[in-house]
Image (cartoon, rainbow, N blue to C red):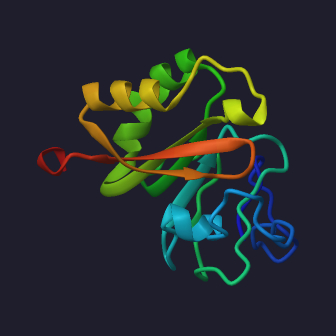
């Protein structure tokens, strides 16, 4: 279960569960997003700038995740941040990099042009900006039919 974009939780204090995943769209692996992202029990994770109601389906998932509220500034093992504008990503990258733990990961999501979205941010801009700051990309994944995401980690020499 994951908090939605507003970090909401159910009455028991557990993050809200996204709808049950159906069959994977054509061209997608069918691998659950939680697995693509590397969520494991005890992961301290945060989702930033997601559209209202967006969440990570955790059906059959990793168990207890320590979800940080979007406003939290604590260190995280995993941050998934969504950006529609390159300038917003560039402005926030240093702060996000400083918040992931040395062995942590920062997933940066951008709107998929193939899904009909117009944006000035893409995989190359994310990769090149991250490399300038000592972060390297190690994986790309579809977050859903509208969003792609690039996984960034600190170079071993920067950890």
Residue 97, above or below 89:
below
Left or right of 157? Residue 139 is right
Residue 87, image x and y in percent?
54, 15
Depth check: give the residue in front, 71 or 153: 153
Q: For residue 104, which quarter of the picture? A: bottom left
Residue 44, above or below 157:
below
Left or right of 38? Residue 128 is left
Which residue is rendered at x = 44% and y = 37% of the image? 96
Which residue is rendered at x = 47% and y = 56% of the image? 78
Residue 111, above or below 8:
above
Residue 22, image x and y in percent?
84, 71
Residue 128, above or below 31:
above
Q: For residue 83, which quarter of the picture? A: top right
Depth check: give the residue in front, 108 or 41: 108
Residue 64, image x and y in percent?
60, 79
Depth check: give the residue in front, 42 or 31: 31
Residue 117, image x and y in percent?
75, 27
Residue 59 visible in the current orientation: yes
Left or right of 153? Residue 19 is right
Image mark count: 0
Residue 73 visible in the current orientation: no
Q: Quadrant of the N terminus?
A: bottom right
Residue at the far front in the pictured view: 26
Which residue is rendered at x = 16% and y = 44% of the image? 158
Left or right of 35? Residue 126 is left
Which residue is rendered at x = 51% and y = 50% of the image? 79
């Amino acid at each position: 279960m994951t908090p939605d974009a507003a970090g909401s939780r159910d009455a028991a204090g557990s993050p809200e569960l996204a709808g049950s995943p159906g069959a994977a769209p054509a061209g997608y692996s069918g691998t659950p997003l939680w697995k693509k992202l590397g969520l494991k029990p005890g992961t301290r994770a945060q989702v930033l700038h997601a559209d209202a109601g967006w969440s990570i389906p955790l059906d059959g998932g990793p168990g207890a995740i320590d979800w940080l509220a979007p406003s939290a500034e604590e260190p995280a093992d995993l941050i998934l941040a969504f950006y529609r504008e390159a300038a917003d990503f560039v402005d926030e990258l240093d702060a996000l990099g400083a918040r992931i733990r040395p062995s942590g990961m920062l997933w940066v999501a951008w709107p998929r042009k193939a899904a009909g979205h117009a944006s000035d941010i893409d995989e190359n801009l994310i990769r090149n900006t991250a490399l300038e700051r000592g972060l390297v990309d190690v994986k790309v994944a579809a977050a859903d039919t509208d969003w792609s995401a690039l996984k960034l980690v600190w170079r071993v020499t920067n950890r």
